[in-house]
Image (cartoon, grey):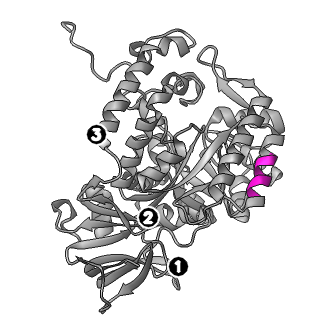
C-alpha cells in the first residue's frame, strides 16, 4: 500500500457532506492511500511513503467533464470557430461538421491532443462519446485519465443537400449493427468495475434514432445500471423535426419513452420549450427534467461561439435541474468552460447576482459525478477517489488570493495548475502530461487536418474549397 501525505496545505477545497457543499479549509493535511483519500484535516502524523510540502499549494477536486467528443472534434481548430449555417438557425451540425471528417489514422492523435488539454486544465474524469474505433479503449487506458466511454449508434445520419434544408438518410440495419457493437464494448468494460475506463450507453441524437432503437438503449442501460446520454434539444431544426414527427418536444418524447432518470443526461438541452428563440406557448420541459432527476450537460463555449445561450443556467438550477459541464469541442479547457458558464449566465439574465462561481463549480464537480452515479468523484473528502489538482498559490496570476477559486477560474485558468492526480497517480507534473506526448500528437493532428482540407470539396454539397467555407480571419498577402 502506498501512502502520500500533502502536509500543511495552504488552501483545500474540501467537501462537507453534512452541508452538501464545497468549502475552504486552511493549513490542513490531505492524505491518500493508493487510489482513495483517507484524511482531510490537521495533525496527521502517520508515516507516509511520500510527503509533499503543501504550504504554497491549493488542493482542488478534479473536474468532471460530462460531454466531450475528443476523438475527432479538434480537427476543426483554426477553421470553424466563427462559422455556422446562417440558413439553418446558426448550427454547424448539418453542413459544417461533415466537412471536417478526420481520416482514421489521425484519430488517436486527435484524442491525445484533447486528453492532454483536459487533464492539464484540471479535468480528472471525462465522458467521451463517438463512433467506436479499434484503438479507442487502449487510448483511454493509456491517458491515465478517468474516462467514461460511450460507443455511439444511430438509425440515420443527417445532411444538407443545399445549405438550407436538413435531410435524414435512414439505415436501420446499420443502426442495429452499431448498437450490437456498442453492447459488446460496454459489456467487456463492465467486467472490471475498478478500471478507470467505464462505459455508458450513447444513442447519438434524439432525432437520429428510431423509437425502437432508443427503447432498446434505455432497456440496456437500466438492465446494466449504467449512465445513458444523448443529444437533445440542441438545435432549433431538431426541435421542429421532433414536433413534426411526434407532436412532442425532444424532452417530452424522451420522457414518454422512459429515457429520463437519475443516470440520464441530455447533451446541451438548450432549446427546451423555455427558450425564447422558439416562442413556444408551453413550459413543461424543465419540470420533466426535475421530476426525473435528469442531468443537463451544459457546454457554454461552443454555444457562445454560435451566438447562443442557455436560457439560463440559473433558471435551470433554481428549477431544480441537476447540471453538469462539458467541453463538447475544442478547446478542451475544462477550467475555462466553468468560467464561461458563469459569465454567460450573467449575460443571459442581465444580472450579476444570478449565479456565482460556486454554482458553476459545483456543476463541474459533484453535478457531473451525480449524472454518472458516482458519489466518490468531484470532491476532496475521506473515501473519495484521489482525483485532484495541485494549484501553485505562489504563481503571480493567483495573487491576490482572498478567494482563490475566483483567482483561479476568472484570472489564472490552467496556468498555475502544477500537478494533477487521478486514482492517486500523478498524471501531470509541473504542468506537463506524463502519459502522452502532447507536442507530437499536435503535430500529427496538423497533418490530419491538411488531409481533411485537401479532400473537403468532395464532402461539400456545393464542392467548395476550404477558403470558400472557412475564410481566414485576415486575408493572406497577395504576394504569397
Residue extending farthest to the top is 479
**In the rendered structure, which disc, 2 or 3, sits on the residue that comes first in sequence?**
2
Q: CA distance from mark 1 to mark 2?
A: 13 Å
- For mark 2, give the secondary structure: helix
Can residue 402 be seen in the rendering of this structure? no
Q: Is residue 379 above or below residue 113?
A: below
Residue to which mark 2 is pinned: 361
Image: magenta residue range: 215-222
| Quarter of the picture holding the C terminus | top left
Give the spatial CA distance, label 1 vs label 3: 40 Å
Q: Provide the residue designation for mark 3.
A: 439
Hey, which quadrant is residue 44 in on the image?
A: bottom left
Which quadrant is home to the N terminus? bottom left
| Depth order, front residue of 264/283 | 264
Report crowding for label 2: few under 14, some 14 to 19, many 20 or more residues within 10 A (C-alpha): many
The image shows a total of numbered marks equal to 3
Residues at circles 1 and 2 in contact by the CB criterion of under 8 Å: no
- Depth order, front residue of 474/80: 80
Quadrant housing residue 386: bottom left
Q: Residue at x 48, y 52 (%)?
A: 141
At label 1, counting other C-alpha atoms closer than 10 Å, the crowd grade (few under 14, some 14-19, many 20 or more) is few
Along the polypeptide, which appears first: circle 1 or circle 2?
1
Q: Which sits in the foreground, 338 or 56?
A: 56
> Which residue has dot 1 on it?
20
Q: Estimate how packed mark 3 is, as few (under 14), some (14 to 19) or many (20 or more) residues with alpha carbons within 10 Å.
A: few
Report the side of 220 relative to 55 (left or right).
right
Left or right: 291, with 471 as reference point: right
Residue 372, relative to residue 49: is it above or below?
Answer: above
CA distance separating discs 2 and 3: 29 Å
SS at mark 3 in the image: helix
Amino acid at each position: 500500500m502506498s501512502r502520500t501525505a500533502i502536509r500543511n496545505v495552504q488552501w483545500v477545497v474540501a467537501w462537507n457532506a453534512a452541508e452538501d457543499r464545497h468549502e475552504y479549509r486552511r493549513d490542513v493535511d490531505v492524505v491518500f492511500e493508493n487510489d482513495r483519500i483517507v484524511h482531510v484535516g490537521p495533525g496527521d502524523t502517520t508515516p507516509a511513503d511520500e510527503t509533499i510540502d503543501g504550504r504554497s499549494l491549493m488542493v482542488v477536486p478534479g473536474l468532471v467533464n460530462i460531454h466531450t467528443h475528443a476523438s475527432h472534434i479538434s480537427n476543426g481548430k483554426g477553421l470553424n470557430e466563427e462559422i455556422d449555417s446562417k440558413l439553418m438557425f446558426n448550427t454547424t451540425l448539418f453542413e459544417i461538421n461533415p466537412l471536417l471528417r478526420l481520416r482514421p489514422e489521425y484519430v488517436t492523435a486527435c484524442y491525445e491532443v484533447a486528453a492532454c488539454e483536459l487533464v492539464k486544465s484540471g479535468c480528472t474524469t471525462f465522458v467521451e462519446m463517438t463512433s467506436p474505433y479499434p484503438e479507442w479503449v487502449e487510448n483511454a487506458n493509456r491517458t491515465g485519465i478517468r474516462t467514461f466511454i460511450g460507443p455511439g449508434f444511430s438509425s440515420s445520419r443527417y445532411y444538407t443537400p443545399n445549405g438550407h434544408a436538413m435531410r435524414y438518410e435512414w439505415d436501420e440495419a446499420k443502426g442495429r449493427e452499431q448498437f450490437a457493437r456498442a453492447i459488446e464494448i460496454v459489456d467487456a468494460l463492465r467486467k472490471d468495475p475498478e478500471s478507470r475506463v467505464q462505459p455508458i450507453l450513447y444513442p447519438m441524437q434524439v432525432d437520429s434514432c428510431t423509437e425502437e432503437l432508443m427503447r432498446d438503449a434505455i432497456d440496456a442501460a437500466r438492465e446494466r445500471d449504467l449512465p445513458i446520454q444523448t443529444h437533445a434539444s440542441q438545435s432549433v431544426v431538431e426541435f421542429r423535426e421532433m414536433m413534426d414527427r411526434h407532436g412532442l418536444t425532444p424532452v417530452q418524447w424522451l420522457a414518454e419513452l422512459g429515457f429520463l432518470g437519475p443516470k440520464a443526461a441530455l447533451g446541451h438541452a438548450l432549446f427546451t420549450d423555455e427558450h425564447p428563440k422558439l416562442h413556444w406557448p408551453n413550459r413543461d420541459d424543465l419540470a420533466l427534467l426535475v421530476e426525473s432527476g435528469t442531468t443537463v450537460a451544459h457546454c457554454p463555449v461552443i454555444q457562445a461561439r454560435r451566438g447562443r445561450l442557455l436560457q439560463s443556467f440559473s433558471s435551470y438550477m433554481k428549477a431544480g435541474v441537476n447540471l453538469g459541464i462539458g467541453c463538447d469541442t475544442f478547446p478542451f479547457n475544462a477550467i475555462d468552460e466553468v468560467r464561461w458558464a458563469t459569465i454567460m449566465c450573467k449575460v443571459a439574465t442581465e444580472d450579476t447576482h444570478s449565479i456565482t462561481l460556486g454554482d458553476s463549480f459545483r456543476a463541474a464537480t459533484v453535478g457531473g459525478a451525480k449524472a454518472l452515479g458516482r458519489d466518490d468523484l468531484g470532491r476532496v473528502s475521506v473515501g473519495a477517489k484521489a482525483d485532484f489538482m495541485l494549484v501553485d498559490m505562489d504563481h503571480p496570476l493567483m495573487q491576490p488570493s482572498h478567494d482563490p477559486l475566483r483567482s483561479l477560474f476568472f484570472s489564472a485558468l490552467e496556468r498555475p495548475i502544477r500537478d494533477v492526480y487521478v486514482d492517486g497517480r500523478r498524471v501531470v507534473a509541473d504542468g506537463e502530461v506524463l502519459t502522452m506526448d502532447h507536442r507530437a500528437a499536435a503535430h500529427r493532428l496538423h497533418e490530419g487536418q491538411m488531409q481533411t482540407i485537401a479532400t473537403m470539396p468532395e464532402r461539400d454539397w456545393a464542392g467548395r474549397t476550404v477558403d470558400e467555407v472557412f475564410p481566414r480571419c485576415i486575408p493572406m498577402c497577395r504576394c504569397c
